[in-house]
Amino acid sequence: MTMNRRYFLGAATSTLATMAGTSPNRAFAEKAAVAASAQSLDYRSVSELRGLLDARKVSAVELFEHAVGRIEALDLHINAVVVRDFERARAAATAADAALARGERRPLLGIPMTVKESFNVGGLPTTWGLTAGRDWRAPEDAVPVARLKAAGAVILGKTNLAIALADWQSFNPIYGTTNNPWDIKRTVGGSSGGSAAALAAGYVPLELGSDLSSSIRAPAHLCGVFGHKPTSNLVPQRGHAPPRSPALATDLTSGLGVAGPMARTAADLSTALDVIAGPDEFEAGAYRLNLPPARHNALKDFRVLVIDSHPLLPVAGEIRTALDQLANKLISTGAKVARSSSLLPDLAESARLHTRIVRNFGAFGRPPEFFKQMQDAVAALKPDDDSLKAWRTRAPFLSHHQWMAAEIARARLRLQWASLFREFDVVLCPPFSVVAFPHDQKPDQEERTIDIDGESHPYLSLIIWGSVATPPGLPATVMPIGRSKAGLPIGVQIIGPLFEDRTPLAFAGMLEREFGGFMRPPEMQL
């Protein structure tokens, strides 16, 4: 192990010496070795680190130290890792090295990672960015966190998020603002924004996020990384609840909210999903997970539907252009690509359905004055107002019968999508209508606007691309496919059939191999 690691860490030193034309002195050689070894670990994937660990070319403690060093050097400007658990993480890395020495092999053994702050990690704060949770610490790990640890992951800490997980920006009164590594004046997205930033900045190769209205997908797109929203209820969420809440084996979002992995490669998403997916321990005695394999093994065999517009909100021209270029590349591989289909469900109705359910869920537990204010707002609406804002305003007052009608509408959507996926294998669409935009922290989100190609639109209408896959519970993978004229990342959302998560994940992996995937932000190369 020592010889291999010395060779691995010292190779760059001899290269530097050769380039200089003279033999470096010992002090220079030692400094060069440290710098070279650190650079050689930057932006490595889980699979690459797994190979180095298994070959004993690097230790888990060295990976831990490298990740911590990078966080401490860069996070003053980015503010992604807001809860740090370095002491326990070092102990976990030491234990991982001992396990590796005994010959143990687990999917994430010795791999450093962080998780979204909204997931309980025993002994650490869970606030959801709410001041009411400031002094609360979780008594035990959330189920996905426990599974990651059991697979050998070394949890360094927790990453920043939006207030109450309800924004496409990640700032709150507890931890402040997370900045985008591509441009620190811009948002990382939300609510899993700190997770995406930590990946883009090269701190860790793997993250755990959650998604209700694009909370994994939007940050992945805005930061140029990979993210996967699993099929509804595929990953148990016990322990993913607001501060001071009991860890219940019940999905309080009716399957809308999910927990899922974020990474810099499609393969790492698949590895993490295999670790965290499957029934909760309360149910595991009754059934087991057996996801079907990907539908195809080559891009030329895929039947692809491409959607680049939505009836309720425009999409930035640069995003549509990137999606069009991707479609043309797919055609060149032999894939069957369609630009429209009569089988596609009504996207406007899906967005309205999603909006009223999510806003009703978000109103739960609000104080009486909130409902009085909303009653006044409803009274001011015209009866025929069918805008998304009108649906948001009326949503807190859904009756149980109206909620049941919404659930029936979701079931019908699932049937429509099932019909579509008999003709197509994946659907490609934008993850979001814009690229990373400047920070806008007006307290009332209704007062915010978003610029799309020079025209102003309601900020909260950005929900629309999250509403395509979420109401029917479909899996969706986001990956980077290009850059804007300003150099900001552009992603694609790959939607697959229900419980066929391996299909969009495999498709993303094929795109990555054929056309390229993650690229590090320019400033992160310094």
Image (cartoon, grey):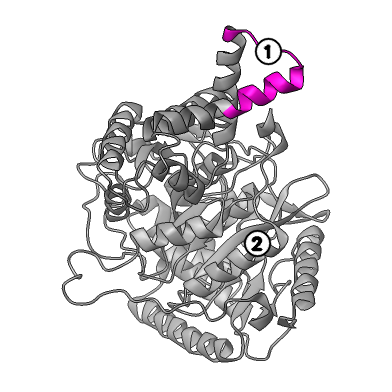
User: Which secondary structure, mark 2?
Assistant: helix
Label drawn at residue 523: none
Residue 161, percent across and down? Answer: 47, 43
Label drawn at residue 513: 2
* Residue 103 visible in the shown view: yes
Q: What is the chief secondary structure element of the magenta stretch?
A: helix
**In terms of depth relative to the viewer, which is nearer, 506 or 55?**
55
User: Which secondary structure, mark 1?
Assistant: loop
* Residue 380 visible in the shown view: no
Circle 1 residue? 23
Quarter containing the N terminus: top left
Indicate left or right for 286 with 298 as reference: left
Q: Is residue 13 magenta?
A: yes
x 31%, y 59%: residue: 237
Three-letter code for the amino acid on which mark 2 is drawn: Arg
Residue 104, percent across and down? Answer: 27, 48
x 44%, y 67%: residue: 230
**In terms of depth relative to the viewer, which is nearer, 15 or 300?**
15
Instruction: Calculate the distance from the C-alpha at mark 2 to the C-alpha at mark 1.
Output: 40 Å
> Residue 189, relative to residue 88: is it above or below?
below
Three-letter code for the amino acid on which mark 1 is drawn: Ser
Residue 15 falls in image quadrant: top right
Q: Residues within 10 Å of mark 2 (few under 14, many from 20)?
A: few
Indicate left or right for 64 with 428 as reference: left
* Callout 2 touching callout 1 (CB < 8 Å): no
Residue 467, percent across and down? Answer: 55, 69
> Residue 118, relative to residue 272: is it above or below?
above
Part of the protein shown in magenta = 11-26
Quarter containing the C terminus: top right
x 22%, y 54%: residue: 247
Query: How many numbered dots are placed on residues in this image?
Result: 2
